[in-house]
Amino acid sequence: MLRLAAALAGLLLITPASAELYTYRDASGARVLTDERPQGHPYETIRSSGAGAASPGSGQAAGDWSPSQIFVFQGPGGERLVTNQRRQDTGMELIATFGRPTARAQCGERARRALASGGGEFADLIHNAAARQGMDPTLVQAVIHVESCFDPQAVSRVGAHGLMQLMPATAAELGVSDRFDPAQNIDGGTRYLAAMLERFEGDLDLALAAYNAGPGAVERHGGIPPFRETQTYIQRVRAQYGGGNGRPD
């Protein structure tokens, strides 16, 4: 069984480059990557995009390592290197890529159409999820716009996935098994946002701060954390949503 911590790079392994990989956290909290379906652990499936699907310098995001992709290189002697490093010595050939490249959200025409139509192709999912939580669907729509620009395949630089950018631990707590599935992602993200509204007694700014930075950060700072990213995030959601409190009148 192929087993390694995803944070480690430079591990030499012989493994089929076209297999599915699975990732989960073990009892110690270490990230495990394996080619055998885990038993007794919540896990995610990483599918190969195929040999030659990507190569250094082919338009990938800048940087030497990826938080969301695994690269398989092959050397001149047939040895294989499984790593999260995008670039290797010239003697190594990239033969497969697993995972999805980190997204760079582009709020273009698709996002504008979605906003104008109450959620576009995701409108029913947004309205149904909001109704189940007694929330204003316009708020859910605003959060999706800011989080992912309505891209269900979005992956952030820290590994948040999908329309509402769920982190692995949050998704596991919410019972979301596929963060790229729009129905699961919107339902889970809406439930989490509703929980933050309840936790902070209906204060929308605090709930949004908790959604972005975590409820612990809000409680430690006794309010909106002094993080520029979080403060900008609240302003952007507010600009899309308006001055409501998140609950329908």
Image (tube, helix red, strand yellow):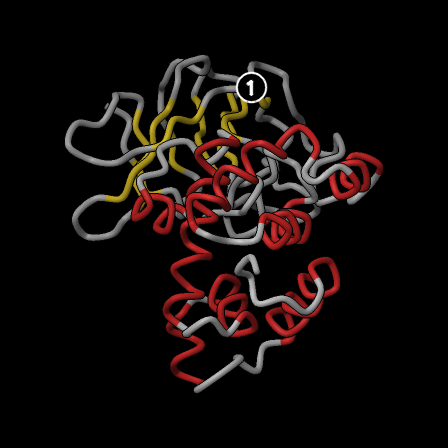
Q: Residue 57: where, in percent of width, then height?
A: 74, 34
For the point 57% across and 82% down, the residue is: 226
For the point 40% across and 48% down, the residue is: 7
Residue bearing mark 1: 49
Q: Amino acid at mark 1?
A: Ser
For the point 45% across and 85% down, the residue is: 221
Work out whether 159 lies above or below 213. Answer: above
Q: Horizontally, is 172 left or right of 161 in the view?
A: left
Which residue sits furthest bottom? Answer: 222
For the point 65% across and 75% down, the residue is: 228
Label tally: 1
Q: Residue 248: where, in percent of width, then height?
A: 55, 57
Pick the quarter of the image with the N terminus: top left
Work out whether 150 lies above or below 38. Answer: below
- Name the residue nearer the viewer: 117 or 38: 117
- Name the residue nearer the viewer: 75 or 211: 211
Q: Say which element carries label 1.
A: loop
Work out whether 205 lies above or below 47. Answer: below
Quarter of the view holding residue 13: top left
Quarter of the view holding residue 205: bottom right
Q: Horizontally, is 128 left or right of 108 in the view?
A: left
Q: Residue 88: where, in percent of width, then height?
A: 59, 36
Q: Horizontally, is 181 left or right of 155 in the view?
A: left
Pick the quarter of the image with the C terminus: bottom right
Q: Residue 6: where, in percent of width, then height?
A: 38, 42
Which residue sits furthest front? Answer: 249
- Name the residue nearer the viewer: 121 or 89: 121
